[in-house]
Amino acid sequence: MAGKTVFVTGGAGYIGSHCCVELLEAGYNVVAVDNFANSVQDDGVATALKRVEKITGKPVTFYKCDLLDRERVMKIFDQHKIDCVIHFAALKAVGESMQLPLQYYKNNLIGTINLLEAMKSTNCFDLVFSSSCCVYGDPEFLPITEEHPTGNVTNVYGRTKYFIEEMLKDLSKSDPKWNIISLRYFNPVGAHPSGLIGEDPTKEVQNVMPFIASVALGKKPHVTIFGNDYNTPDGTGVRDYIHIMDLASGHVAALKKLQTTKDLQYKVCLGRGISVLELIREFEKATGTHVPTVQGERRYGDVGTLICASKKALSELDWVYNLGTGRASSVLDLIRTFELVSQMKVPFVMKERRHGDIVSMYADTTLASEELGWQARHDVLRMCEDFWRWQTMNPNGYKSETAATNGNGIPEKTAKSAFTNGNHVNANGDGVKASNGH
Ligand code: NAD
């Protein structure tokens, strides 16, 4: 791991910044880019990544760069020896995507194509792509396995994810050097336990946890829950919430998997085949387990050497993993847990079901557990605790901090400041579709 350089797109964003912490702590170097379409900057500096450096004590190389600027992306790839890429950068607001479809298709699809071309031109073929459970559409069965049909997506944002997944499959088939994993996230929430980084979008808050927090802080009047008569334990929509640090560690697991595959691919592509013992050693290395072996007599009819056309087989392997917890929580569960943790009231109003809302969505995570050796560790209580710590230490997100950190990088605004903000303004009367994840 040490010495490997990961190129992180959208690194200043919510998931990207948390993932950078995990990558640096796992010994990777990070080169990150972002255009600040949905993240906070201080004169071209990514505030979240400055804090990542404080948490880890390690540097992040950062460029303000739009993936639509092909030349600039190419230039950055020429300046660094990039070993692998994690591609977070995307526009992700479901509602906005329906109003601005061309902007979403352009940003998400063309941005990805530019990135893939820069990778190819510098012989970098290892990619982890941020996909989403929304590619499954309205679930046909629960829990959702990776084999669940995809493509029946009802919004433009989700379709960009689906189209990119399909494009990546085509790319893998076209050239076996590509080594790609798509991770389908369920509903990431929470924050790093230090309270130093968290979710702070520059666009209007859409995700459920920041919305609940802003209601708790009096910045919004209430959460609106659409539908309380669904066939779920308390009648409200059900989702699979996953702690952001669990999601981040899933990416490190995916990178390890890519590396193992690449090693195998390299050996096989040399045309020299791989012995049973080598295969066992590779497996042990990848999984950290010991596989006991005993030497048996040769068996009549066994073939000594058989090098199959694994190049083709490997190129057609198409890796997709769900990153979720496998546990279902309702919107009300989330609100109640948040109230418990924050000791603040979160008013909510119930409204009619909305057409197209998905009732229930949670993951089967067996594949990620078996093949990546990864499992989510944190429960909803921990997600709320960590998010509330971030929120109370930074009631105005990163914007409040830039000036106000003490020598340890700990923001001077503390939990208290959240409660002394008597300015309970109704920022707008909107509720949030509190059951929808993307
Ligand atoms: P985010 O908006 O916080 O982060 C995305 C970052 O990408 C932002 O900082 C934004 O400025 C940047 N960006 C967007 N377009 C860019 C471009 N053309 N060039 C450079 N930078 C660009 O979102 P997030 O929650 O961290 O999501 C990260 C990824 O995970 C996205 O691809 C998103 O679709 C996917 N995802 C998120 C969720 C979720 O609930 N947060 C769920 C499933 C999938």
Image (cartoon, helix red, strand yellow):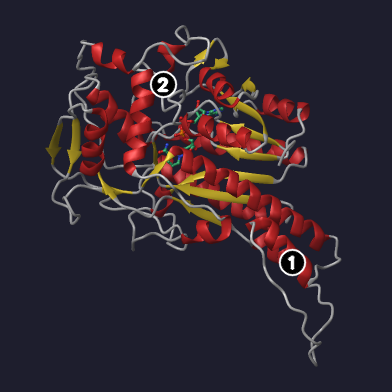
Q: Quadrant of residue 261?
A: bottom right
Mark yes or no: residue 430 visible: yes
Front in this rendered view, residue 112 or 415: 415
Q: Is residue 160 above or below residue 230?
A: above
Tell me how far mark 2 sits from mark 1, CA to CA: 48 Å
The quadrant of the image that shows the N terminus is top right
Q: Is residue 277 above or below residue 436?
A: below
Q: Which of pointers 2 and 1 indicates the residue nearer the eye?
A: 1
Q: Is residue 91 left or right of residue 170?
A: left
Q: Quadrant of residue 430?
A: top left
Residue at 69 percent across and 66 percent down: it is 313
Residue wearing tag 2: 202
Residue at 60 percent across and 29 percent down: it is 67
Q: Are marks 2 and 1 in contact (CB under 8 Å)?
A: no
Callout 1 amino acid: Leu
Residue 133 in the image: state x and y as whole percent.
42, 49
Residue at 81 percent across and 60 percent down: it is 267
Residue at 80 percent across and 70 percent down: it is 275
Callout 2 amino acid: Thr
Q: Earlier in the sequence, mark 2 or mark 1?
A: 2
Crowd rating for badge 1 (residues with CA inside 10 Å; few <14, some 14–19, many 20+): few
Outermost bottom residue = 300
Residue 372 in the image: state x and y as whole percent.
57, 55
